[in-house]
Image (cartoon, helix red, strand yellow):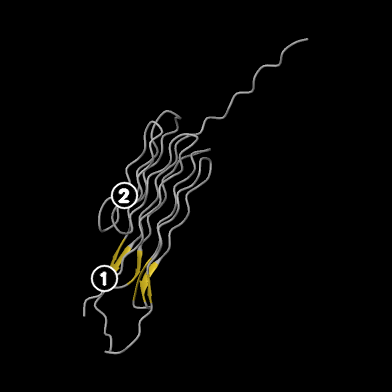
Amino acid sequence: MPVAAAAAATPIIPGGGGGAGGYAEAIVPVEPGGVVVVTVGVGGAGGAPRYNGVVGGSTSFGTLVAASNGFGGRSGNPDSAGGNGGRGTVGTLLLFGGPGGDGPLAAALPGGAGGASAFGGGGRSAFLGGSPAHGQAAGSGAAGGFGPNTNGGTGANGLVIVEY
């Protein structure tokens, strides 16, 4: 009886890094005793092997100042593009967050690094089965996963600074 040839396994390609959230700044009038709703975006979770990273949350100071979230990196199958950065959406100084680095289209290389925010760098990529770094500075992206057993890192939470 002939023996069937073994099926080729699909390699797990390292994922792309997550994009950083945007940055917004403004001098705005407020009244003593007034209430302003502050929302701090939560960093997006890293994807498991073969799954894309999760979009982070947006950050705002009421409706007066706001910045959008960064986007999760792609899973690596069939491509490993880094996530796009967010952007400042409301305010007088509006900046984009850095994009995540693309992961290589080869199974033996590390995932893409996380995008840098206005406050600093993102997570460093993993190699040889090590854990990818989570977002380091406020609003920064995390590194993409490496190999069949390593999820991508988690992006850093946003930040609101109020001076009165």
Total marks in image: 2
Q: Earlier in the sequence, mark 1 or mark 2?
A: 2
- Residue 32 rendering spot, x and y as whole percentages: 26, 89
Residue 15: which quarter of the image?
top left
Q: Amino acid at mark 1?
A: Ile
- Crowding around mark 2 (Cα neighbors within 10 Å: few <14, some 14 to 19, many 20+) is many
Residue visible at 27% across and 50% down? 121
Q: Quadrant of the C terminus?
A: bottom left
Looking at the image, which residue is at 39% across and 45% down?
17
**Residue 89's quadrant in the figure?**
bottom left
Q: Position of residue 79 (x, y in %)?
A: 49, 39
Residue 35 rendering spot, x and y as whole percentages = 35, 85
Residue bearing the label numbered 1: 161
Q: Residue at x 48, y 47 (%)?
A: 47
Q: Residues within 10 Å of mark 1 (few under 14, many from 20)?
A: few
- Tell me the residue that label 2 is attached to: 122
Secondary element at tag 1: loop
Q: Are marks 1 and 2 in contact (CB under 8 Å)?
A: no
Q: Amino acid at mark 2?
A: Gly
